[in-house]
Each structure stands twice: as C-alpha cells, then as structure tokens.
Image: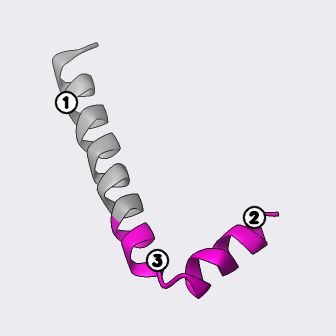
Amino acid sequence: MGFFALMFLDIMELWEDTMTTIALMIAAILTAIVIAISIGV
C-alpha cells in the first residue's frame, strides 16, 4: 500500500514537495528535542 502512495506522489509530480515537507518536519522535531533536553523537560 505504501508503494502505491509513493508511486502516486511521483506520478502527480509531488515528490519534491513531499521531500521538502519531510525535511522540515525532521528539522522541527530535532530542534524541539534539543531544546527540551537542554531545558531538562
């Protein structure tokens, strides 16, 4: 099922936008973790 979702993104030419969104999400998560650990939460 996941394979078909990725093929759909490629067919609709949304691959680059998807990778940009995932990169932003990863950056936000890592930033939040670093801040939380340094504050001591």
Pair 3/1: label in front: 3
**In the picture shown, does residue 11 fall above or below 36?**
below
Label 3 and label 1: CA atoms lie apart by: 32 Å
| In the displayed structure image, the side of residue 37 where residue 10 appears, left or right | right
Closer to the camera in the image, 40 or 17: 17
Residue type (three-letter) at the residue carrying disc 1: Ile
Q: Which residue is mark 2?
A: 2
Identify which residue, 13 or 33, lies in the foreground.
13
Residue under numbered circle 3: 14
Q: Reading the chain from its start, which is encountered first: label 2 or label 3? A: 2
* Residue labelled with disc 1: 35
At label 2, which amino acid type do we have?
A: Gly
Q: Which residues are magenta?
A: 1-20
Q: Quadrant of the N terminus?
A: bottom right
* The C terminus: image quadrant: top left
Q: Position of residue 21 (x, y in %)?
A: 36, 61
Element at label 2: helix
